Amino acid sequence: MTSIDQSGTFALGDRTVKRLGYGAMQLAGPGVFGPPKDQDAALAVLRQAVAAGVNHIDTSDFYGPHVTNKLIRQALAPYPNDLVIVTKIGARRGSGGAWLPAFSAEELTQAVHDNLRNLGLDVLEVVNLRIMFDAHGPAEGSIEAPLTALAELQQQGLVRQIGLSNVTAAQVTEGRRICDIVCVQNHYNLAHRADDALIDDLARDGIAYVPFFPLGGFTPLQSSTLSAIAQRLDATPMQVALAWLLRRAPNILLIPGTSSIAHLRENIAVEKINLPDDTLKDLDDMAEAFGSA
C-alpha cells in the first residue's frame, strides 16, 4: 500500500466529507428492528459524533423501520451545512424483521418520500439503491429498471446524487451507463475482500467506496495476529481493522456504527493510528489467510 492520509477527506460526488463517518444502523433495536433500548443515549451518540467533526452519516428508513431517521432528525436538525446524510432504499422490513426486496418504481418513490419526511428534508443528498436480488450478498442481474426509477426521482429534484449498494462490478458498470454513480457501498473488510479490484477501479475514477460490516458485522473479526498487532500498537483489534481500511485505498469512506459514546471515541481515534509498513504486510498476509480459510 502507498502512503494515504488517513485523517483526510474524499469526494462524495460534489460534496467533500471526512473519511471517517458514522453509520446509524446500530441505533435501532436488536436485529436493526424496533426502537433503541435507550433513546437518550442514541441521541447523545449522534450529537457527539457531529461535535467530534463527523460530517458523513449513513442511515436508511428501513432501519427500525423509520427509527434511525427520526432519531437523526431529533438529534441534529437543523442540520449543519457541511453534514452529508446518505440513505438507502430498495428494501423493506417484514412484520418479524425480515429483510425483503422493495424496488418497484412505486416502492422506491414511497421510500424516497418516507426518507424526506422522517429526516425533515426537502431533498436527499445521496441515495444508495440497495440491490436485493439476494439479501445476503451481491447477485448478478440487470439493475436498469430500479435505477432508472431512482434517476427519475433525481430529475424531479427529490434526490441530488445516487449510489449503489450490494452490487457486483458488472452492475456498477451498468449503473454508470444510466446515471452518475457517486459511491458504492458493499460488504468489505480484512476478511472479506472480494471487491479489491472494484475498489481500485473506482479509486481511479474518483468514486467513493463505503464498506459496510467493516468489522465483520454480526460475526466480528477474530484473529490472533490481529490481536497481537493491536497489542503492539496499544490499540484494540477493531481499531487496527479500521485503520487498515483507511490505508487500503484513498477512496474508502468508513461508517462504523455504535450506540456507545465510548466506542464512538475509539472509532474516531482510528485516524491517529499509524500502521508501519511491516504491520501493513502482516495485515495483508492475514487478509489473504482469511480469504483462503
Image (cartoon, helix red, strand yellow):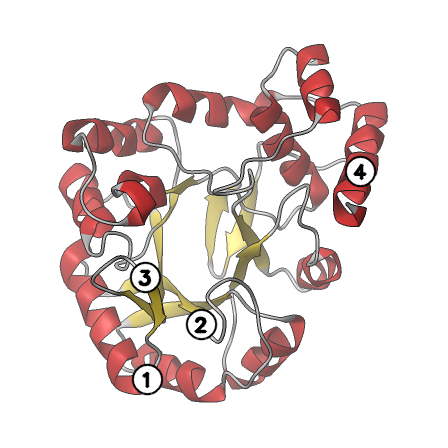
- Tell me which residue sits at (67%, 64%) in the image: 205
Sequence-first disc among 2 and 3: 3
Q: Earlier in the sequence, mark 3 or mark 1?
A: 3
Contact, CB < 8 Å: mark 1 with mark 2?
no
Instruction: Tell me, yes or no, whether the two marked residues, 2 and 3, touch with CB atoms within 8 Å.
Output: no
Disc 1, SS = loop
Mark 1 to mark 2: distance in Å? 11 Å
Depth check, mark 2 against mark 4: the one in front is 2
Numbered disc in front, either 2 or 3: 3
Q: Report the disc number at residue 265.
A: none
Horizontal placement of 93 versus 187: left or right? left
Q: Is residue 250 above or below residue 246?
A: below
The residue labelled by disc 1 is 104
> On the picture, is 283 further left or further right than 155?
right
Mark 3: amino acid = Ala
- Give the residue at mark 3: 98
> What's the mark number on residue 284?
4
Q: What is the CA distance from the residue labelled 2 to the residue labelled 3?
A: 12 Å
